[in-house]
Image (cartoon, rainbow, N blue to C red):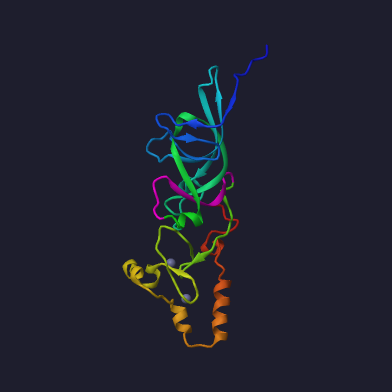
Amino acid sequence: MAKTRPPKKILESYTIKGSDKVIKPGDCVLMRSADTSKPPYVAKVESIEAAGSRGTNVRVRVRWYYRPEESIGGRRPFHGSKEVFLSDHYDVQSADTIEGKCNVHSFRSYTKLDSVNAEDFFCRFDYKSASGSFVPDRIAVFCKCEMPYNPDDLMIQCEECSDWFHPSCIGMTIKEAKKREHFFCQSCTAENGKTTENFHEATAESEEKSNWLSRAGVGLDRRL
Ligand SMILES: [Zn+2]
Ligand SMILES: [Zn+2]
């Protein structure tokens, strides 16, 4: 005898229990982790449906954002505290586990926020959960230490070559870097007074440094 499936109904929105916050497909949400010692999961809502005989069982299809520590390679020094990766991992979860809404910003808009609230995150990588690989698999690096930019760390920009530096990497305190009005890095200071040709050479060199993840030790084919 054929079983009759409980009717499913696609919902346009869902109101988080115990709040007046309305979730719609496309919104980012925080979802309670089964392990209460862990921070909530970050997810993007793909669709919302009601199932069960009375349509009271609301479920959401989500696409997970991974925190760096949930990725195969783990957290690296350049990962921001509010960084998440958009994964290719989808799931269906009970809407009851939604704790609240959150915002996942692009990297650029995150760095322009006046203040970062608890619900603000940023995403600059897509993450393939099976292979642990990232898209893009290369990223610009800065400073003498050749690290990608971590928005949590203050950096100071050289007015000549436009490279960015960590104060600690150039023997400066954060306090000094903050009050510094002009900054020229060591190699640009050394270039001072040289001919335009030399300056062009220096520019070409810093462009060639071209600053990719592979150079920061995160190889294109390295299993992170
Ligand atoms: Zn550095
Ligand atoms: Zn410079």
Q: Position of residue 187 (x, y in %)?
A: 46, 79
View quadrant of ligand 1? bottom left
Front residue of 201 and 104: 104
Front residue of 37 and 40: 40
Q: Residue at x 58, y 51 (%)?
A: 133
Q: Residue at x 55, y 85 (%)?
A: 198
Total numbered labels = 0
Q: In the figure, is residue 81 to the left or right of 64? A: left
Which quadrant, please, contains the N terminus? top right
Q: Is residue 123 magenta?
A: yes
Q: Position of residue 193 (x, y in %)?
A: 48, 88
Q: Residue at x 50, y 47 (%)?
A: 71
Q: Is residue 115 magenta?
A: yes
Query: Is residue 197 depicted above or below 18 in this figure?
Result: below
Q: Which residues are magenta?
A: 114-130
Q: Position of residue 146 (x, y in %)?
A: 49, 66
Which residue is most to the top? 1
Q: Position of residue 101 (x, y in %)?
A: 45, 39
Query: Is residue 144 depicted above or below 134 in this figure?
Result: below
Q: In the figure, is residue 81 to the left or right of 14? A: left
Q: In the figure, is residue 6 to the left or right of 156? A: right
Which residue is most to the left? 175
Q: In the figure, is residue 193 to the left or right of 170? A: right
Query: Is residue 146 depicted above or below 97 in this figure?
Result: below
Front residue of 19 and 207: 19
Which residue is most to the right? 1
